[in-house]
Structure formats: structure tokens, C-alpha cells
Image (spheres, rainbow, N blue to C red):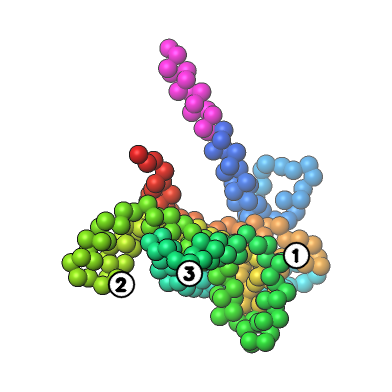
Amino acid sequence: MREPITRILRGSALALILLFFLFPILWILLMSFQTNADILRIPPRLGFTPTLSNYVALLSGKLATSSGTLDITFLRNLGNSLLLSVASVAASLVLGVPAAYAFARYRFRLGESIAFTLLSFRFAPPLLVLLPLSLYFQILGLTDTYGGLIWVYQLITLPLILWIVRGYFEDASPDIEHAYRVDGHSWWRTFTRIAVPLARPGIAAAGLLAFIFAWNNFVFALVLASADKQPVTVGALAFVTAAGIQYGQIAAAIVLSILPTLALALYAQRWLVEGLSLGAVKG
């Protein structure tokens, strides 16, 4: 008798926890199908007539307000986010995975200091480096360019990939690599055929987390890029107009902007779970 009650209580507790974490997402989803009048109604009502006008405005690029029609570039911003995030993570993987292997397998002078310096870039507040970055970008001609944004995004993605993947290389036994090298294979062949496949779950997990952090970045693109190269996080400011805040369009933009990261997380969940759990139990 006690076991069924325990099971019911445990299920109820899990349901409440799930509802607590999913409620904001559900609320945003419902807001995306409401007009501003429904959202701002006092007192609020649960019942409303669903509308697709918010999504139509985003996809058509025309935002109707009380003061007229505004042109918005949400789809361009969404494409910019995809380009910047994918290119930044790809560049970080190309640079970070070999560097993580070097830090994990070799001991050299100032190695730990260099690794910690790279990690400190992730700790530093963006506002701390924005002013010197703005000056350097003007001198180098990188202001308002995709290349410049991808470069500065390395401050977000590269330290994350470097330190996560380094841990997985350190957890993997080097004996297999030594045996492979004894057979006459080169360092590069050992790295690509042995080390990288062993650390693949960690690389996938680090890449996914780096993609999410790059996708959510706001400050760098706000200062270093113009409207036609800004990601969706900055483009959402277009919905704050002189006529008021367009809450319905903001909610619809949030729903559309989380779809790429949600789809990527669902696709890579097997590698993500395996990568995050690798090394959790030792002995």
C-alpha cells in the first residue's frame, strides 16, 4: 500500500517540477497567438481568440502599429544568427580541439597559464573589452563585418570548447594512442583516428553548448554591427517602437528563434547526454 502512494507522490512532484520549468515557455507560446489588446487586458483572461498575425508580421517583414506600418528584418536577423553561430563554432572546433589535445597530452612551460588565460576571456564581462575592441575593429576595418563578429565570438565559444574537450582527452587513456604510434603512424593520424573518435561525445556536447552561447549573445553584435548584420537577439529591439512594445511579435520572435537550438538539441541529445555524463563515475 505504501509503494503505490510513494509512486503517486513522486509522480506528482515530478509533474510540478516539470510544470514549473515549462510554464514560461508555454506562456510565451500562448502570447505569440494573442494580440497586444489580449495580452494587456486588465483583468487578464485565460480565454482568447488565437491569431497568426504576429507570425505573419515576422515572415512578411511588415509590422502594423497604431502609428503606421514599420519594416522589420526578422528573417535577415535569424539568418545572421545562424551564420554567426555556425561559423563561430566551426572555427572554434578547428582551433580548440587540437589545442585541447595539446594541453591534455603535453606539458610545456606556461601551459597552464596560457590555458587559464584563455578561460579568463570567458569570465570577463563583455563591457570590459568592448571599447578596445571597437577601436581595434575601426583600425583593422572589421567594424560591421561578418568576419569581425565571428572573430569576436571566439571569446565566447573557444574557451568553452577548449576546456570541456580538454577534460575528455584527459579522461581517455593515452595507451591506445601510444600503441598506434608504435605501429608507425604519425601524430596527426593518431589524433584524427584515435583521439578524436574517443572524445567525440565531449566534442559534440561542447559544440552544442558553444552554439547556444553564441546564439544568445547580445552585446557584441549590438555595438560592433549594423542592423543588416545583427543577430535575432538584437533584432528583437525593433519591436520596441514609439507606439509601444509589441509583446505579441516579441513572443512570436522568441518562439521562432528557439526552434533552431531546440532542433539541434533534440538531434544531438544522445551525444549530449553521453558527453555530459562521461567521466561522472570513476573507479
Say few, some or many: other residues with alpha carbon within 10 Å of mark 3 (under 14 / 14 to 19 / 20 or more): many
Q: How would you rate the neighbour count of disc 1 (Cα within 10 Å): few for under 14, some for 14-19, many for 20 or more?
A: few
Dot 2, crowdedness within 10 Å: few (<14), some or many (≥20)?
A: few
Count of marks overlaid on the render: 3
Which residue is at the front of the view, 269 or 242?
269
Nearer to us: label 3 or label 1: 3
The one of 196 and 257 positioned closer to us in this rendering: 196
Q: Main secondary structure of the magenta part?
A: helix
Classify mark 2: helix, strand or loop: helix
Query: In the displayed structure, would residue 224 be above or below residue 158?
Result: below
| Residue kind at label 3, given as amino acid type | Ser
Give the residue at mark 1: 240
- The percent coordinates of residue 223 (x first, y second) are 70, 73
Q: Are marks 3 and 1 in contact (CB under 8 Å)?
A: no
Residue 143 in which image quadrant = bottom right
First reached walking from the N terminus: tag 3 or tag 1: 3
Amino acid type shown at disc 2:
Trp
First along the sequence among labels 2 and 1:
2
- Residue at the spot x=67%, y=76% of the render? 133
Residue 14 drawn in magenta: yes
Farthest residue, direction top:
1
x%, y% of residue 236?
67, 65
Q: Nearer the viewer, residue 15 or 216?
A: 216
Q: Disc 3 to disc 1, how far (Cα)? A: 34 Å
Quadrant where the image shows the C terminus: top left
What's the magenta region? 1-15
Residue 188: which numbered mark, if any?
A: 2
Residue at numbered disc 3:
92
